[in-house]
Image: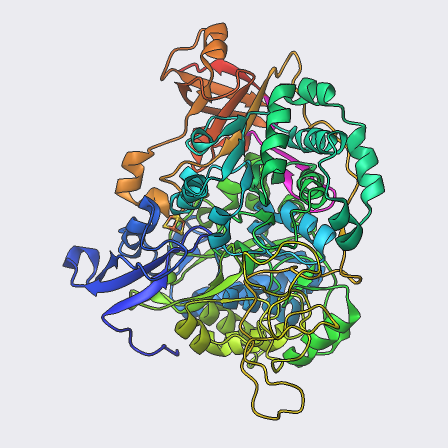
Amino acid sequence: RTSPAPAPASTPTHCPYCALQCGMNLRAAAGSEAAGGDVVEVVERTDFPVNRGALCGKGRTAPAVLSSRVRLTRPLVRRPATGRLEPATWEEALAKIAEGLGRTQQAYGPDAVGVFGGGGLTNEKAYALGKFARVVLSTSQIDYNGRFCMSSAAAAHQRAFGLDRGLPFPLEDIPRTGCVILVGSNLAETMPPALRYLTELKENGGTLIVVDPRRTRTAEQADLHLAPRPGTDLALALGLLHLVVSQGRTDEAFIQERTAGWDEARAAAMAHWPEHVERVTGVPVPQLRDAVRMFCDAETGMVLTARGPEQQSKGTDTVGAWINLCLATGNAGRPLSGYGCLTGQGNGQGGREHGQKADQLPGYRKLTDPAAREHVAGVWGVDPDSLPGPGRSAYELLDALGGDIKSLLLMGSNPVVSAPRAAHIEERLRSLDFLAVADVVLSETAALADVVLPVTQWAEETGTTTNLEGRVLLRRRAVDPPPGVRTDLEVLHSLAALLGHEKGFPVDPEEVFDELRRASAGGPADYSGISYRRIAEEDGVFWPCPETPAGDERTSGQDRTAGADRSAGADRSAGEDRTTGQGRTAGAPPAGDDRPAAPHPGTPRLFLDRFATADGRARFVPVAHRPAAEETDAEYPVLLTTGRVVAQYQSGAQTRRVDELNAAAPGPFVELHPRLAQRLGVAEGERLTVVSRRGRAVAPARITDSIRSDTVFMPFHWPGEGRANTLTNPALDPTSRMPEFKVCAVRIERAQD
Ligand code: SF4
């Protein structure tokens, strides 16, 4: 096993949880014997610009999971005699996985084995897992839980701009714009240190509009809060665009010079009259007018979306409608303006760039692109024709378990809690011939496995992540893992060897990253100019960052100093190549000078002179409102929406193991309006059963006037009787294959104890 160099006394690194990837220092300290020796303390790290030392409770307490008493430190194998998971050696556990996967493929073919990854895996792991699936297993059936996170925004980004990077500008630009429309994001709970960007926006005289069916702690900061009925954000965006057009607030010069498809998009928006939009969304027309006035009066504006509009069966079109609003008002591809997605999971951005997604190869390349297949196959040393084609999306893959997918290898995910229609997915997992899971604790999904492998965590291993800004970061190993635990890279190395691939799966993360760089070279997400050394020296590098010598044309975007003249074709930065309209790298020598070129500086800001489409123009996409896949009726008269609370993270596999977080957020609840509570005769704290067409969940009532009276809210972090995802609807967006987590029809009953 290869270990990176010994860590210094205090190690700069990043939080294991959300996509903000807050910087922190970790310091090893002597721990109690009961906890197994060394423990790790979090020490403030103020030099990392994203969070400047601020952390939420999850990040501050993350080391508790390292020394948790329920930490897995030995492989487990299910024994036929007892039917229980019992300790085993690594050799036995790995051999059983190789045998289980191999047996399935011999009997049913390569695609009978599925692979499921996670948006929390480092770039190196995501890359190695995708390569393992396609080279060792030759299966097309690989996807990951990031599909449940921001895939609709990614698809809309691709469609409009030709490239998907969550934020095409750094967070530091947000306080300097004029107006932000924040759609379906509760930053105050999901990534609290990011709230300061909105606070500073207001301190600088900017305005904040929040769109959310709940008056969240974030919405309370807003100058204007729009509370649409869940599932109607698309209609809301169309209504705003209608008003922008009818009030003559479009930016015609920008539309002419930088976009295509406006006539069709305008016609689609003009079919959505504000009065009709009010009936659909419940947002009064005067509020729509206020929003248009605030957004258009600002010199520059941004629209930021999160899971609210994205986790819908029309998520791609919904995000597309908000992008259309940006394009029509000239708020894209210019300094201090644009559309961005606030990605959720820790490596939700990098996790979708390096090949664990069903339809993609490393570098964000399309699996169906012959040139991409040839390039990546060359790096992998295999025949391009041997690479399988695209497989099923995450929910479709999970739904096929026990059907034509007989065995599954799962890393970094807990779908028993996090997948929609979770009871059904749990049953599918139980029906598998063979299930292998690598995790740090015995998650609800790991508990169903035939073999469980105990793996290292964030602070025990080195690897890169890419935060929501597209900033590639280095998480450093700060402490030794407990004896008996191995890294995911070691697991893949060993399994590959057992399955006949002695080479090609190194265990050293830097070696994997160097291969990833080569695989990504020339692709949309080009990491070839990024190295561990550069990340360490520069505290993060924004992709695309090609290794191509400076002075060459860039492929997908370019940076220009924020605050520069916003008019298209206005003054360009010194050194820019006027024939291509693309920025020339700072430090590049002039033509004819053969001195070594400076390295590419990375690209904090995309699209400033051209979008990443073939003709450089952004695309309007005509979209129309359509209802949620499931509307209310007499049997299910209330809407359910789901989300997160500040003290828990995603399926809770890690945070539910931290006492301090459990004390703050011990379990699920059903948030409902006093009018609905009165109609149902429900009192605060009373146990309620929420029933949907897919099942029932039980949790106490929390009565608040901060939610619409036609809607209830449940957080989704817990398993058992309060599992919110038992209720959610797996109706899929036709483009992104995102399930409709954010809206379904339910009825509320008083629970029978
Ligand atoms: Fe920062 Fe997110 Fe970690 Fe909280 S969970 S400390 S917001 S990275």
- Total tally of numbered discs in the picture: 0
**Front-most of 131 and 308?**
308
State which quadrant residue 420 falls in: top right
Percent coordinates x, y for residue 223 in the rendering: 49, 30
Q: Is residue 314 left or right of residue 639?
A: right
Looking at the image, is 693 positioned above or below residue 592?
above
- Location of residue 342 with respect to 641 vertically, above or below: below
Specify the quadrant of the image occupied by residue 297.
Answer: top right
Q: Residue shown at 44%/36% (left/top)?
A: 719
Where 690 falls versus 93 (above or below)? above
Q: Is residue 450 visible?
A: no
Q: Specify whether residue 730 is painted magenta.
A: yes
Residue 396: image location, x then y, percent = 67, 46
User: Which quadrant, please, contains the C terminus?
Assistant: top left
Query: Taking 546 as reference, is 73 left or right?
Result: left
Left or right position of 506 against 332: left
Residue in view at x 65 percent, y 47 percent: 331
Res 287 → quadrant = top right
| Nearest the eye: 721 or 79 | 721
Determine the residue positioned at 45% across, 76% down: 534
**438 in relation to 286, above or below:** below
In percent of width and height, residue 81 lies at: 43, 51
Highlighted magenta segment, given as a residue range:
727-745
Which quarter shows the N terminus? bottom left
**Does the magenta segment cover residue 386?**
no
Residue 724 at x, y percent in the picture = 50, 31
- Is residue 328 visible to the viewer in this orientation of the structure? yes
